[in-house]
Amino acid sequence: MERLAILGALHEEIADLLAAMDPGAAVHRIAMRDFHVGTLWGTPCVIALSRIGKVAAAATASIVIREFQVSRVIFTGLAGGLHPDVEVGDVVVAHSLMQHDMDARPLFGQHEIPLLGRVRFESDAELSKRLLDSAGDFVRGRAIEGAARAQARVHGGLIATGDVFVSHAEEALALRARLPDALCVEMEGAAMAQVCYESGIPFAVLRVISDRADHAAKTDFTAFLENVARVYTAGILAPLLKARAL
């Protein structure tokens, strides 16, 4: 039986998914994490809270792959916008991910993952395309209902990951200069992607832009997390799971 893993760094990002799981879902406690195993909108799933940061995300991805034999992994949550075309309320689906804080020079190139010989990890094209399409439908639907910016958009491209919450304009500008094609910045995706790559597991990353990675990031992120994050995640994933499209 194929099983999908859905991971998020904060409870609010996966709360509606947990609430929607069938009542018979089992909870397995491993390495201080709860893995909820059951059916979500008709699809066999494991849902887990990874916690924040690259180590936490990598550890959770490793456990869910080894212990629950999942066939694919989706990481979902919020991110700070980097690219000028990306605004608060937009959705980003990763085509690839990289660790912007990896720097083992002069032994290896900047951003290169030592001994893997690569900087970027490409997400599964089919899985990502389905997320992009569903996100587009969701954003358009909310705009029609007047619950989101009428111009909210969906983007596919590079996501940058690092163990730092970018909340100063100077930090964001430096990242934009170094990685001009990066759409947004977060703290887990590329670490999960590396584990999936090494394990041969297809993956995708879905992020909603909560802030612009500047001085207002903490306030914007907190408000968006509490009021919007869970709605986006469930709204985008539900149609795909109900249609057995993931």
Image: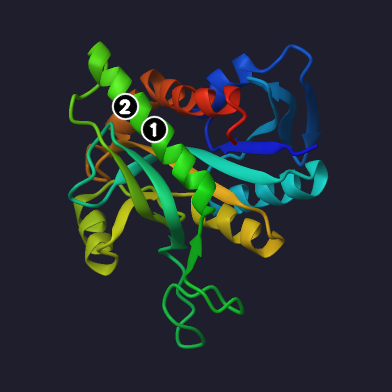
Q: Which residue is drawn at 45% across and 22% down?
A: 235
Q: Which residue is drawn at 76% across and 20% down?
A: 25
Q: State whether residue 148 is above or below residue 2.
A: above
Which residue corresponds to mark 1? Answer: 135
- Number of labels in the image equals 2
Q: Position of residue 120 (x, y in %)?
A: 47, 66
Q: Residues at badges 2 and 1 in contact (C-beta under 8 Å)? A: yes
Q: Which residue lies furthest to the bottom in this view?
A: 106
Q: Quarter of the image containing the C terminus?
A: top right
Q: Closer to the camera, 76 or 163?
A: 76
Q: Quadrant of residue 3?
A: top right
User: Going by the image, does 32 lie left or right of 168?
Assistant: right
Q: Residue at x 44, y 82 (%)?
A: 109
Q: Closer to the camera, 139 or 23?
A: 139
Looking at the rendered structure, the secondary structure element under dot 2 is: helix
Q: Closer to the camera, 211 or 205?
A: 205
Q: Quarter of the image containing the N terminus?
A: top right
**Does residue 199 appear in the picture of this structure?**
yes
User: Going by the image, does 113 lie left or right of 235?
Assistant: right
**Circle 1 crowding by C-alpha within 10 Å: few under 14, some 14–19, many from 20:** many
**Does residue 222 appear in the picture of this structure?**
no
Q: In which quarter of the image is residue 160?
A: bottom left
Instruction: Name the kind of residue labelled 2 in the image.
Output: Val
Which residue corresponds to mark 2? Answer: 139
Instruction: Name the kind of residue labelled 1 in the image.
Output: Ala
Q: In which quarter of the image is residue 26?
A: top right
Disc sitting over residue 206 in the figure? none
Q: State whether residue 236 is above or below residue 165.
A: above
